Image (spheres, rainbow, N blue to C red):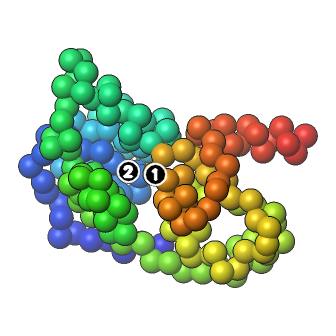
């Protein structure tokens, strides 16, 4: 669950990096991105933004924004860090700012425990985390030993900072393929 924050719906930078399509949840943000060159974290976010009429120049394909920085610095784009604003949720903004990025917080995550998920986690041997917030919300309910899996990029970095050694998949699709083969 999340709560909308509408106090930051404008910024001057010509480029936006949308960390997750759920960050663009109102008409003000949609209109703002119509005036920006927009990049995003993965193809799912790209498609969801496109449904809102937002033109997306490219994405990190779930590999982490760091993979884009050489491309952005190339003569093809010549983008600088100062040209970007990261659109994300309030908790994640701090992580981006520590890396020197300017941020725009569109929402705040509200951690609400789901008893069904807790019971499933207690019975499972592992979980695929798509954000560090998921792990932090449920970490006290995990059995030992427990296998932590995640996509590459920011999620893997933040899980490692929590002292975990996750199995990192290049994309969510790669994880799904692995899981399907494992279950065959």
Residue 113, visible in the rendered structure: yes
Mark found first going from the N terminus, 1 or 2 = 2
- CA gap between label 1 and label 2 equals 10 Å
Question: Is disc 1 placed on a helix, strand or loop?
Answer: helix
Q: Nearer the viewer, residue 19 or 26?
A: 19
Q: Is residue 72 above or below residue 172?
A: above
The one nearer the camera, 107 or 153, is 153
Direction top: furthest residue: 75
Residue 28 at what x, y percent from top left? 20, 58
Q: Secondary structure at mark 2?
A: loop
Left or right: residue 23 compared with residue 112: left
| 56 is higher (above) or lower (below) than 124 | above
Number of the label disc, if any, that sits on residue 137: none
Residue position marked by numbered label 2 in the rendering? 19
Task: Kindly indicate whether the residue at mark 2 contacts the one at mark 1 (C-beta within 8 angstroms).
Answer: yes
Q: Position of residue 103 (x, y in %)?
A: 24, 57
Question: In which image quadrant can residue 91 be found?
Answer: bottom left
* Residue 67 in picture, x, y percent from top left: 41, 34
Question: Along the horizontal axis of the image, is 157 left or right of 17?
Answer: right
Residue 112 in which image quadrant: bottom right
> Residue 43's spot in the image, x, y percent?
48, 37
Relative horizontal placement of residue 23, taking residue 168 as reference (left or right): left
Viewer-proximal residue, 30 or 158? 158
Which of 103/28 is in front?
103
Tell me the tag on residue 154. Answer: 1
């Amino acid at each position: 669950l999340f709560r909308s924050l509408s106090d930051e719906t404008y910024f001057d930078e010509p480029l936006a990096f949308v960390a997750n399509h759920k960050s663009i949840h109102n008409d003000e943000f949609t209109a703002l991105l119509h005036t920006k060159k927009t990049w995003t974290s993965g193809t799912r976010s790209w498609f969801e933004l496109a449904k809102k009429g937002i033109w997306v120049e490219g994405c990190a394909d779930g590999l982490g924004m760091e993979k884009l920085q050489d491309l952005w610095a190339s003569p093809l784009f010549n983008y600088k860090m100062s040209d970007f604003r990261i659109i994300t949720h309030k908790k994640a903004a701090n992580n981006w700012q520590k890396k020197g990025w300017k941020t725009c917080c569109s929402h705040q995550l509200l951690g609400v425990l789901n008893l069904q998920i807790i019971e499933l986690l207690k019975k499972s041997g592992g979980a695929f985390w798509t954000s560090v917030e998921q792990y932090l919300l449920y970490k006290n309910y995990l059995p030992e030993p427990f296998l932590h899996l995640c996509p590459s990029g920011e999620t893997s970095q933040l899980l490692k900072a929590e002292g975990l050694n996750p199995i990192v998949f290049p994309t969510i699709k790669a994880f799904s393929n692995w899981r399907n083969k494992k279950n065959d």
